[in-house]
Amino acid sequence: MRILAVSDLHYRLPHYDWLTRVAADHDALAIVGDLADVASAVPHPVQTVVLDRYLRDLAGRTRVLASSGNHDLDGPGEHGEQGASWLRGAAADGLHVDGASVDVGGTRFTVCPWWDGPVTRQAVADQLAAAAVDRPERWVWLYHSPPAGTVLCRDGRREFPDHDLAGWIEEHRPDVVLCGHIHQAPWVEGGSWHARVGDTWVFNAGKQVGPVPAHITLDLDAGTADWFGVYESGSVAL
């Protein structure tokens, strides 16, 4: 089971083009939030049309898992809290998005949405509790924000801890959590692209310029994780 993990592409189309070239070399592609970019000159509704086409193209090459981040939100749902309705609408065979849990061989992937308040937070809590039932040999989460208590929260000036995620990890003890959100975490002093919460490995590939996105390749059968950054790279044994 080889997983290619990226996050925070922020509508950088050369990065999506690179993914289309390499996706078929992996058993799964995990895009962990902020597919779009609210600061872009391209209107958000236009971005989501283009991203929908990329996601469907990628799903024709490998299994795709895509979770929302704060830049992907496109309006309140019936509960009045923000969500990424365009991403949920993109769900298809081989394309698993917010709210999904899917088993691939002996690995369960749970794709968590960005939550905006108590209603959507409870939906994530319920999703994780349901996915914990009869869990298979390995369990991997996609969740955009990194957990509190890890160096993945550091941007060089301050920390942005997600205490809820840290609590859910402690409760359910997944094998791997794929995050993003803090672009600088792998490069700042005291930061990193990987961390541990108990027995759980947590990864944040970071965000970089250039034609190739920062990315992590996990080989769950070999027990390795390899990170590629623009000027450096690294590996850990799981």
Image (cartoon, rainbow, N blue to C red):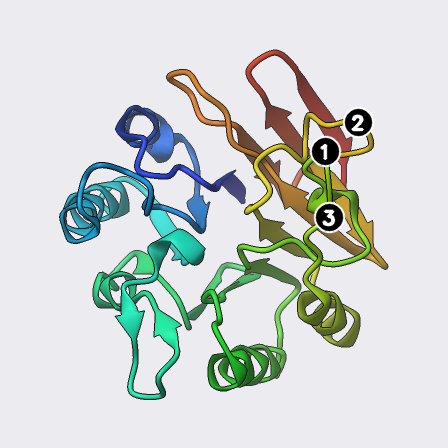
The residue under the point 57% across, 36% down is: 183
Residue visible at 47% across and 80% down? 120
Category of crowding for the residue at label 3, using alpha-carbon neighbours closer than 10 angstroms: few (below 14), some (14–19), many (at least 20): some
Q: CA distance from mark 2 to mark 1?
A: 7 Å
Q: Position of residue 143 (x, y in %)?
A: 55, 59
Question: Vertically, is 58 above or below 97?
Answer: above
Residue 190 at x, y percent in the picture: 82, 32
Q: Secondary structure at mark 1?
A: loop
Could one spot residue 42 in this view of the protein?
yes
The image quadrant that residue 227 belongs to is top right
Cβ–Cβ under 8 Å for marks 2 and 1: yes
Check residue 156 in the rendering and tell me which mark sits there, or answer none: 1
Q: Amino acid at mark 3?
A: Glu
Q: Amino acid at mark 1?
A: Gly
- Of all residues, the one furthest to the right in this rendering is 198
| 19 to the left or right of 193 | left
Question: Which label sits on residue 189?
Answer: 2
Secondary structure at badge 2 equals loop
Using residue 81 as the reference point, say whether residue 148 is left or right of it: right
Residue nearest the viewer, comparing 174 with 125: 125
In the image, residue 107 lies at what x, y percent? 56, 60
